[in-house]
Image (cartoon, rainbow, N blue to C red):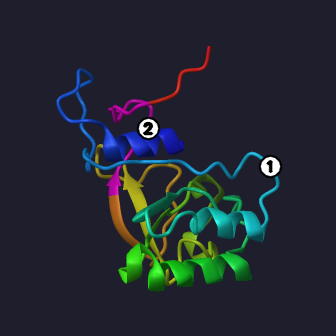
C-alpha cells in the first residue's frame, strides 16, 4: 500500500507509464513498521523518523476498521506528533497525512480513529470515478479533503506503481 501511495505522489514526469505523480520532483522513503509487534514505541519512532529531513509523513494505518474499535495514539506517539508539528523541518513543522479509513463495509466511522481525528494530522478520504462514495469509505468531520481512488469493480482504476511478487 505504501508503494502505491508513494508512486501516486512521486511518479516521475515524462515516463513511459502514462502517469505522473502529484509531486513528481519529490523524494520518498519508507519506514517499515507493520511487520512485527506494533507498540507505542514503534509508532512513535515511525512518525518521528528523521524529522528535520522528512517534510510529510503519510500513513494508512490505525485501529481496526471493524465498526467496533475506538482507539488512537498512545502517549509516546501523541508526543511524537506534537514534537513533529512544533519542531520538525527545522521549526516549520512536519505534516502528518492520514487515510480516513477503509471500514465502510463494517459501518466504521473515522471519528473513532484517534489518528485521523488528531489535531496533529490531516485526514484524507476518497471518491470513486463517479464522484460517489466507495464501499470502503469511512465518513467523519475530521476529513479535510477527498481524492480519487478505486470504487466499484466497473469503475476506472488509477494507474499506480506496484510491487509485483513472483
In this picture, is 119 found above or below 88? below
Q: Nearer the viewer, mark 2 or mark 1?
A: 1
Mark yes or no: residue 118 visible: no
| Sequence order check, earlier mark of 2 and 1 | 1
Mark yes or no: residue 165 visible: yes
- Is the stretch drawn in magenta largely helix, strand or loop? loop
Residue lying at 56% horizontally and 69% vertically, measured from the top left: 110
> Which numbered circle lies on residue 36?
1
Q: Is residue 153 magenta?
A: yes
**Where is residue 160 drawn, in percent x and y?**
38, 33
Q: Residues within 10 Å of mark 1 (few under 14, many from 20)?
A: few
> Which numbered circle lies on residue 116?
none
Rendered image quadrant of residue 164 = top right
Quadrant of the frame with the N terminus: top right
Residue lying at 45% horizontally and 76% vertically, measured from the top left: 88
Segment colored magenta: 147-161
Rendered image quadrant of residue 47 = bottom right
Helix, strand or loop status at disc 2 = loop
Residue lying at 47% horizontally and 29% vertically, measured from the top left: 162
Helix, strand or loop status at disc 1 = loop
**Where is residue 112 drawn, in percent x and y?**
63, 75
Q: Considering depth in this image, is 123 or 162 the residue closer to the camera?
A: 162
**Where is residue 101 drawn, in percent x and y?**
55, 59
Tally of numbered tags: 2
In this picture, is 92 found above or below 123? below
Residue at the top extreme, as displayed? 166
Q: Which residue is mark 2?
A: 152
In this picture, is 103 found above or below 139? above
Q: Are marks 2 and 1 in contact (CB under 8 Å)?
A: no
Quadrant of the frame with the C terminus: top right
Amino acid at each position: 500500500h505504501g508503494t502505491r501511495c508513494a508512486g501516486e505522489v512521486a511518479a516521475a514526469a515524462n515516463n513511459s507509464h502514462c502517469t505522473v505523480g502529484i509531486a513528481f520532483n519529490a523524494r520518498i522513503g519508507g519506514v517499515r513498521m507493520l511487520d512485527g509487534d506494533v507498540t507505542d514505541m514503534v509508532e512513535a519512532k515511525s512518525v518521528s523518523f528523521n524529522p528535520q529531513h522528512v517534510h510529510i509523513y503519510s500513513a494508512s494505518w490505525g485501529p481496526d476498521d471493524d465498526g467496533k474499535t475506538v482507539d488512537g495514539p498512545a502517549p509516546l506517539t501523541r508526543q511524537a506528533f506534537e514534537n513533529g508539528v512544533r519542531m520538525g523541518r527545522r521549526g516549520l513543522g512536519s505534516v502528518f497525512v492520514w487515510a480516513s479509513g477503509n471500514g465502510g463495509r463494517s459501518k466504521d466511522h473515522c471519528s473513532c480513529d484517534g489518528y485521523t481525528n488528531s489535531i496533529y494530522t490531516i485526514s484524507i478520504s476518497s471518491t470513486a470515478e463517479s464522484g460517489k462514495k466507495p464501499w470502503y469509505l469511512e465518513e467523519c468531520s475530521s476529513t479535510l479533503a477527498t481524492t480519487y481512488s478505486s470504487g466499484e469493480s466497473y469503475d476506472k482504476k488509477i494507474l499506480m506503481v506496484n510491487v509485483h511478487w513472483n
